[in-house]
Amino acid sequence: MEQIKLNKENPEIEFKLKSDDSYLLIHSAFITSQKNFENEWTNFISKVKLTAELRHAVFVDPEGRFIDDRIMQFPIHLLVEPYQVQPIIQLNKLIKNETIKIGINTDLKFYRTLKLELKDYENLDSNHTLELNIEKCKIDD
């Protein structure tokens, strides 16, 4: 199992998918802070949104100006139990790569990149970090 950290200074991470059966499993999330915080982590959860994006670049012109790509984006819900006191969230979220058809071509393609991004709705405190415990299969950083 591996650990990645997302915060205000480093809000996203991108992975390269090697095959159509690549996957990323997010076991759990843990909120940490540089300052002493009792129940303040619930405020952090209410202010941020974690999203995943699968992308396949179809065309990039020789000068890199025009990109035609296929994107599938979805949220990863950070749900907290009503009487939860620990800043740990069990996610067990499996993000599997998928095959896609592009145009009239019958060849199946697959998404090449997976991006996890922490988006903030309000002014996010820079002291907080979301640590994700992940498992990767056929994926490069």
Image: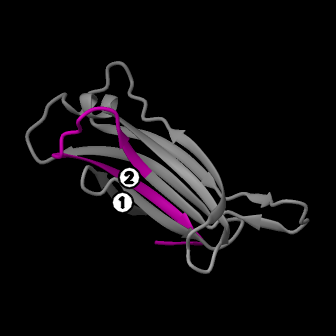
Q: Quadrant of residue 85?
A: top left
Residue farthest toward the left in the current orientation of the protein: 36
Q: Residue at x 32, y 20 (%)?
A: 83
Q: How is the image coloured?
A: one colour
Residue sitting at 70 percent across and 65 percent down? 21
Please name the residue that numbered disc 2 is placed on. 132
Q: Which secondary structure lies at badge 1? A: strand
The image shows residue 47 at horizontal and vertical percentages of: 31, 31
Within 10 Å of disc 1 (Cα), the crowding (few <14, some 14-19, many 20+) is few
Please state the horizontal and vertical placement of residue 123, each as a whole percent of the image: 23, 35
Q: Which mark is residue 4?
A: 1
What percent of the width, then of the height, locates residue 140? 51, 74
Separation (CA) of disc 1 from disc 2: 5 Å
Q: Main secondary structure of the magenta part?
A: strand
Q: Which residues are magenta?
A: 117-141
Which three-letter amino acid code belongs to the residue tagged 1?
A: Ile
Q: In this rendering, is residue 107 above or below 90?
A: below
Tell me the quarter of the picture where residue 40 sits: top left
- Image-quadrant location for residue 62: bottom right
Percent x, y of residue 69: 66, 60
Front residue of this view, candidates 109 and 76: 109
- Side of 84 where 70 appears, left or right: right
- Closer to the camera in the image, 80 or 48: 48
CB under 8 Å between callouts 1 and 2?
yes
